[in-house]
């Protein structure tokens, strides 16, 4: 099925550990995004990639890095996890043609202890 | 400042009634608005969008209204069903920007 696939779905890290969240889309979208969602808050943009080969900071980039591996894949890395990074992470992709509405993945629930 | 917000964090609706979810935005440069639905444990799902050159747009059982004068948009759901129980987010963007900014969300609960 066409869409955005995120892995893993759940992860528990110890403070200071590192990990990479993977995201892949098969809709041939140019733009890809990483958001985090905390209780009682909307989605906040961490990083985005307007097109293959470019990445830009969003609203809350500190503590994260990203890689746009190719048109399909956009990964998010936590180099040294902190409890404040406990959240649900969503990847999305979109295209400027037609609707701007993004397609979201099902999320990664990350807990840092 | 730039922000998108919803008037009420929760809304309880009787099954079969119409629901109205409101959203206020402060950035007059915003020219594209989207409503998303998020069910528990899932990612946001696109419902309907509207551009700033429109006042109203209708979909299947949903209508979005945009009032640029007061920077307000609303989502109306007709004949609300149990499956409509979810968190609803409004989001805004500008045509010269790839970023989408979200409000905090309204939790809709449908009473049987």
Image (spheres, coloured by chain):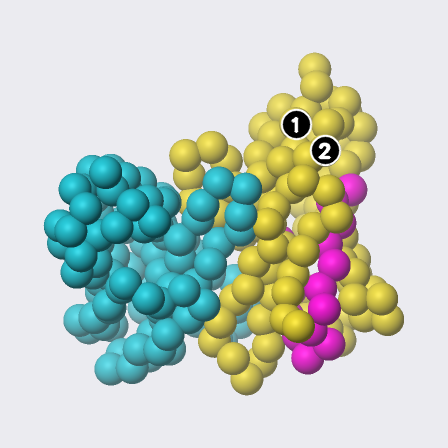
| The quadrant where residue B112 appears | top right
- Same subunit, tags 2 and 1: yes
Residue ranking furthest to the right: B69
Q: Quadrant of the N terminus of chain B?
A: bottom right
- Please say whether residue A48 is visible from this viewpoint: yes
Q: Main secondary structure of the magenta part?
A: strand
Residue B98 vertical position relative to residue A85 in the rendered view, above or below: below
Question: Which of the pair B20/B28 is nearer the observer?
Answer: B28
Which chain does the yellow colour mark?
A: B
- Residue located at (19% from left, 46% from top): A15
- Find residue A11 and report its image quarter: top left
- The percent coordinates of residue B65 (x first, y second) are 79, 57
Q: Which mark is residue B88?
A: none
Any mark on residue B109, and which? 1
Badge 2 crowding class, 10 Å Cα cut-off, few under 14, some 14 to 19, many 20 or more, is some
The residue labelled by disc 2 is B11
Q: Quick check: is B16 in the magenta stretch?
A: no
What residue appears at the point 81 percent right and 70 percent down from the top-left corner? B68
Comes first in the chain, label 2 or label 1: 2
Cα gap from disc 2 to disc 1, whole angstroms: 6 Å
Q: Name the foreground residue: A58 vs B31.
A: A58
Extent of the magenta region = B20-35
- Chain A appears in which tint? cyan
Q: Which quadrant holds residue A93? A: bottom left
Q: Chain of mark 1?
A: B
* Residue B27 sits inside the magenta stretch: yes
The chain carrying label 2 is B
Q: Secondary structure at mark 2?
A: strand
């Amino acid at each position: 099925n066409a869409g955005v696939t995120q892995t893993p779905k759940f992860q528990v890290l110890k403070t200071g550990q590192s990990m990479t969240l993977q995201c892949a889309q098969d809709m041939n979208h140019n733009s890809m995004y990483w958001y985090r969602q905390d209780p009682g808050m909307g989605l906040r943009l961490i990083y985005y990639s307007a097109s293959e080969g470019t990445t830009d900071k969003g609203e809350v980039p500190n503590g994260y890095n990203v890689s746009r591996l190719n048109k399909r894949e956009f990964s998010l890395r936590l180099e040294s996890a902190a409890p404040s990074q406990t959240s649900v992470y969503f990847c999305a992709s979109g295209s400027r043609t037609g609707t701007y509405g993004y397609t979201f993945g099902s999320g990664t629930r990350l807990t840092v202890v | 400042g730039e922000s998108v917000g919803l008037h009420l964090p929760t809304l309880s609706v009787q099954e079969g009634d119409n629901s109205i979810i409101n959203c206020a935005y402060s950035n007059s440069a915003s020219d594209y608005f989207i409503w998303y639905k998020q069910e528990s444990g899932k990612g946001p799902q696109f419902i309907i969008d509207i551009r700033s050159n429109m006042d109203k747009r209708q979909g299947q059982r949903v209508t979005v209204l945009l009032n640029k004068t007061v920077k307000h948009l609303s989502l109306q759901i007709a004949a609300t069903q149990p499956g409509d129980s979810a968190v609803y987010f409004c989001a805004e963007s500008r045509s010269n920007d790839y970023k989408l900014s979200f409000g905090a969300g309204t939790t809709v609960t449908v009473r049987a």
